[in-house]
Image: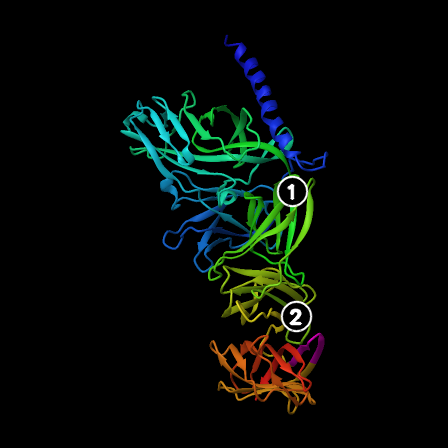
Amino acid sequence: MTNLLPKLTIAIFALIIVSCKKPDLKEENQGNNQTQRDYSKIPDASPVSSRLMVYAIENNQSTIPYYVLANNNSINYNSNYNAFISTGFVSLDKYTSTISFGSRSIFGFDGYYPTKTFTASNASKNYTNIKVLPLISAGSVIGNSGSGTIRLPNNGDLVLPPYSFGTPANPGSATSFWINAGFTTPSAAHYAAYLPCYPMADQGGKRWFLNSYGVYMLSPWASDNNSYNVDFKENVNVMLRMPIPTNLSSVPDTIPTWNINDKNMWQQNGVAVRNGNYYEKKITKKGFWNFAVPVNGVYTTFHLKANNGLGIPNVRYLIKNGINEVAEGRTDANGDGLVFIPTNKDLTIDLINDHRFNLGAKIQGLPFGNFNKASEISISLPARQDVVTMRGAVFDCDGKPITSGFVGIRAFTNDDEYLFPITDGKFSAAQWIFRGGFFQDTLTIYNNQGAQIYRYPIGLKSNLPSPSYIYNYDTRYYTCLNSSQLYCNYRIDSNNYSIVGNTTAISPELNTSPANTNDIRFNLSNNGKGIRFYTWFVANGSYGFIYHSNVTVDGVAVQIDASPAQPEIHLYRNDNRVGGFKEGWFSLYYKDNNGTTHNATGNFRIKIL
């Protein structure tokens, strides 16, 4: 009889695979004409190197310090950014990067330490979320000889025969055994974030997308000194019962079940069998149990861009198939994301600004696409007042472009310092920032080795909920205090102008005075060409408003038009002394003699007289 068991097991397993895949393949082909569906081969390891930031979303890290491990690199929590931040580049993998919480985790009392396997890129910085599936104390049995049925979340059951538990120590010393349990399903909020590995599994030379019917997390613990050092015995019939979802178009008699293996990836562990309105599975260990049917899946890379084509970094995204969550993550430093998705499904994407002070700004239900092969797409963020873009140039003391390096923008309202590469002396940047208001931020110029060259205070502003003005900054930065260059680069409507000067001139017209009061005159002109106005300043002298009177354009007095937006000025350098400099950016709308409204915006470096 013993010799027949392996053959019988193989026969049953083959029958199960056929019976569980047929209903799903039939369902997959409904409503589309594509008969050739693509799939993903198991990709080879693809090492990448990048900085890493990890956000433990909707969890409080303010009082208990703990850390994240990424390939044995310890990444510490930084309260200034509300995130875990690597001090340098860490080794990751494009398809299967894995992190875990280190010891002292505030979640240790639940009996498990969270892990996350996610995709990564070779960008200068990658971002990922980790969110802990909440567990409840579901019930207990008295002593290891006790038995009973424990009601789990989602009306599931855990049937415990006598002597269900084993530990490295003597389990008989425990007076009771408790079960902490949690449940999630694709139609529930945060499903994709709760998963310890994105929903994929490798089997038969393919990488499959796991179409889940539900996921349980089970964490037993004992009332002795061993606490959570306890597990289910493999040779005892511990039965997990999950209610069958009521919204299925077909209900197979069996479905595969999956655990997390030592590589933190889903691996099949038998099948669950239908019994009335439940799927039942004898379980052999604690942890995650995923009731899921494998379906064809492919990788898709998407580029999230502002309406002017610049990539938007560090935006949380959520891919959905109807109400079911498929994938989640954050765009990298280039504004890109890599997701593994099921084929032949009409998918949508939600974009979420979840940084502090941003009030949970969301853009929901944007079309993402329907795919039957690996693809690469672009997604344009609708024009919004809270998406700010910046193009700039970086110079040395002699006015020559800096050929390489990075510009780091530390936005107070976002939990990050964004890094944008300098190429041939220029950089471009896009950020989804605070929903209205002005804050003091920082712009830092780095060389390729990450050493700081120069740092400026800057001001970035968005204008929600009104007026409907979109900020696009155009700036220049000199990396030393002693440059003799003066300039004003400005645009009126679609026409660009440039005024240049030098501090060695006997009477440079690119100037400002006086140096130490709020009522300051700005002369951004030379030989009668350019703009002049008076301002007053707030925010420690870095952000101000332009008076509606005494404004001239090319020597002609004009009337301010405040209906599109109030005129304003930002300073990212203010020496505030005679002989020093002011550097900054301005924007105003004005009406000409015919009553036509024009927009003037520009940046400047002028001398204080």
Where disc 2 sits, the SS reads: strand
Q: Earlier in the sequence, mark 2 or mark 1?
A: 1
Q: Residue at x 50, y 41 (%)?
A: 195
Q: Residue furthest bottom?
A: 506
In magenta stretch: residue 509: no
Q: Amino acid at mark 2?
A: Ala
Residue 39, horizontal then vertical, whole percent: 67, 36
Residue 115 can be seen, yes or no: yes
Q: 6 left or right of 598?
A: left
- The mark total stands at 2
Q: Which residue is mark 2?
A: 393
Q: Residue at x 46, y 51 (%)?
A: 57
In magenta stretch: residue 490: yes
Residue numbers of the magenta segment: 486-498
Residue 523 can be seen, yes or no: no
Q: How is the image coloured?
A: rainbow
Q: Which residue is mark 1?
A: 299
Asked if the residues shown at circle 2 and circle 1 are in contact, with their CB atoms under 8 angstroms apart, the answer is: no
Taking depth in this image into account, of 542 and 247 the one nearest to the observer is 247
| Chief SS of the magenta region | strand
- How many C-alpha atoms fall within 10 Å of the one at disc 2: few (<14), some, or many (≥20)? some
